[in-house]
Image: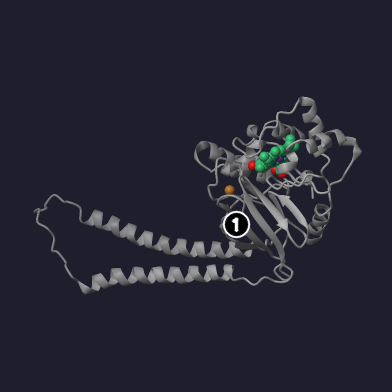
Amino acid sequence: MVRRRVHNRALVQGIGSKVSGLGGLIAGFLLAASLCFGGPANPSPPNMFRPASTPADAIFHISIFVLIISGVIFAVVFWLLVYVLVKFRRSAGDDGREPPQVYGSNQVELAWTVLPILVVFVLFLATARVIHSIEDARKPPEAVEVIAIGHQFWWEFRYPSLGVVTANELHVPVSDPAHPTPTFIRLLSADTDHSFWVPRLAGKTDLIPNRTNNTWIDPHEVGIYVGQCAQYCGTQHAKMLLRVYVEPPDQFKRWVQEESKPAQVSDAFSEGRRIFESMACINCHAISGTVADGRFGPDLTHLMSRETIASGAASNTPENLRLWIHDPDAIKPGSLMPAMKLTDQDLDALTAYLETLR
Ligand code: HEC
Ligand SMILES: [Cu+2]
């Protein structure tokens, strides 16, 4: 896969900012433009009208069904209203008397009670069917299992049977409908309510403390799908973006192999490593094969295998990484990583060391 980096930070953030006002419009436009002219490694926009996975597909179809029924009701009521307004408007020869009052007509009362009940009932049944088909889907033995843990303001992804721990960028195999390899995701929260939402892959499901929720996806097309936390969880909620990398099976297998290895140790950047291990970094971050085993922040063992940092708030470039360590608030004001007040020299050594974590 050609690894393309989105250099424009506004673009990455554009996905996350709630599309509101001119700024959102422009960001959305830029994003759309970049998608038209960009390569295949660009993420596809979070469009729920372009489903690429069974649950999203089912939700898309029920939405269209509901939209059509509501549209027909809207059209009928609207045109009746216009007809009545025009036909019975005050005319020049009005004598000012009230029209005949119809009261207690059984036919009329029945019609406007029974018809709406029937419509609501049909919508209820159709929706319940879709919810049931998604919630009670059978988990095939080939399914990939992932535990997603929501944190303020990033995602932890664990693959318990594959020995992989990563953050913010979820890798899953593409699922061929003939031999489905869906990914079943257990949703937990480390602090407050979050919501897992990748519109092209599945509906929203909340991550609630002390509760286990589940969702699943079976993406049919290779690509990068973006989404974001869809439940307000604090100041940086809007920059709690999600990226799902859907890969061909062999590429996914290679990714798992790489990710399950401990961090590469090289003597070349031992100064940076010494700084990392002598500071509070290790209380919050884990790097497997070293003393760092903190769990409060993202696992950094294979930091360089990720295209973005800080939950999609910035692309993973040396400059952004350095800026992040210098002052996380410069990228994500209110993020829960403190600025560690390092000297320029230490900052350079530390960044160089992190750059080796492939
Ligand atoms: C108090 C805990 C804490 C300490 C100490 C801390 N971090 Fe973090 N770090 C975090 C949290 C939380 C995040 C996730 C922030 C977010 O995305 O909102 C993070 C994110 C990061 C990231 C981005 C990872 C990614 O994949 O997005 C890097 C790199 C990083 N920290 C490096 C460091 C280094 C280097 C130090 C020491 C100089 C350090 N951190 C100290 C909590 C901490
Ligand atoms: Cu959140």
Q: Residue at x 54, y 50 (%)?
A: 231
Task: Give the residue type at disc 1.
Answer: Arg
Q: Residues within 10 Å of mark 1 (few under 14, many from 20)?
A: some
* Residue 344 in sight from this viewpoint: yes
* Residue 175 x, y percent position in the rendering: 71, 64
Residue 9 location, quadrant: top right
* Residue 197 x, y percent position in the rendering: 59, 54
Above or below, 35 against 10 in this view is below
* Residue 118 x, y percent position in the rendering: 37, 72
Q: Nearer the viewer, residue 351 or 272?
A: 272
- Would you name the residue on which mark 1 appears? 50
* Residue 53 x, y percent position in the rendering: 64, 62
Q: Nearer the viewer, residue 164 or 307?
A: 164
Ligand 2 within 8 Å of disc 1? The answer is no
106 to the left or right of 268: left
Above or below, 285 against 108 in this view is above
Q: Residue at x 46, y 63 (%)?
A: 66
Residue 249 location, quadrant: bottom right
Q: Nearer the viewer, residue 302 or 297?
A: 297
153 to the left or right of 41: left
Above or below, 60 against 232 in this view is below
